[in-house]
Amino acid sequence: MKRPRAVLRIGLALLWFQAGGVALSADETVTWFPQVNELFRPLLADPTEVKVSGQYFRLHGLDVVDFSVGETWGIKRWTLNGAPDWKIQWNLGGVVTPRFLVSVNINQLEAINFFLNVPVEMRHGRFSGRGLLFHESSHLGDNFIERTGQSKITFSREGAQLILAFEPLRFIRIYGGGAYLLHTIPELGKTTLQAGLELRTPNWHLFRNHDCWWYLLQDYQVKEEVNWGVNKDIQAGVSFGFSNVRRRLRLFTNYFRGHSPFGQFFNQKEQRLGVGIGFDF
């Protein structure tokens, strides 16, 4: 797997070098604290993506809810005056993803993941890309330890990710790339390959000044840490919002099969079908 790792390193170096090169250029327009998700849209089918959402499903005969509560802040955007189609942006993001067992009597925290990342995004016409450095840690909930007696493991990692995307048509996006861990506890395989497809319908305009469309998202990840096992995440739903307003509401169903996205359970397989709600800001 030396070639994917080399391609990832070269791609990240080029993206970060481009951001630094633009910053040193005099023929540019600089915007501080710009809007986010304009150059590179989030990968909403990726369980580790920065987003605000929650979903309910049954797992091993138990009622489970996964939440994601995160935010991305735009720090600086560069636009080349001689080539206005080229835009590069530096962001800061983070997300917390807890998992709860839910019941009539009490809700129990099973595990929680923390992600912090520093992305550099790029867009040129129908092409876009994102390179980021990230930190991830995972922790068991006290309720889970008391119920199962399982001991927690120290799970922490830092790495780099590069994703490139192309939009052949207005309502289609194809992406691919990967991640490489620079440091990991416990010591695991360090390479992840990732690809996906996103589809949506045109606006329905069911009500005046409202937008509505159906969408389908597919994300596939192949992880060296689980002997190149494949994680498949498929999400289908409908997105609602006011015309010309960034905030949107999503209602969806989600199918996941593969190894758990929670670091404490990284070597455990899951297969689940759930329903959820998401908020796009």
Image (tube, rainbow, N blue to C red):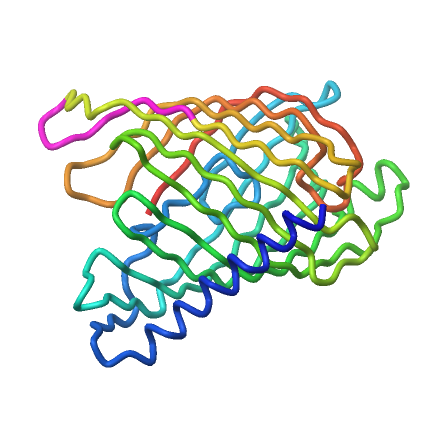
**What residue is rendered at 65% in x and 44% in y?**
192
Figure label count: 0
Q: Quadrant of residue 1?
A: top right
Magenta stretch: dominant secondary structure: strand
The quarter holding residue 171 reads top left
Residue 143, image x, y percentages? 77, 43
**Where residue 18 sits in the image (x, y, percent)?**
40, 67
Of residue 172 and residue 93, the one placed in the foreground of this image is: 172
Residue 269 picture location, percent across and down: 75, 28
Residue at (33, 62) in percent of width and height = 88
- Residue sitting at x 25%, y 47%: 125
The quadrant holding residue 89 is bottom left
Determine whether 270 is above or below 278 in the image. Answer: above
Is 58 left, or right, of 163 in this rendering? right
The part of the chain drawn in magenta is: 207-216
Image vertical order of residue 77 relative to residue 68, above or below: below
Q: Residue furthest front?
A: 3
62 vs 146: above or below: above
* Magenta-colored stretch includes residue 178: no
Direction from residue 160 to residue 189 in the image, left or right: right
Residue 223 on image: x %, y %: 70, 40
Which residue of the protein is positioned furthest toward the left in this rendering? 208
Q: Decide if residue 272 is on the left or right side of residue 81.
A: right
Residue in front for this viewpoint, 53 or 193: 193
Q: Is residue 228 left or right of residue 242?
A: right
- Residue at 46% across / 60% down in the picture? 119
Question: Magenta stretch: residue 212 in it?
Answer: yes
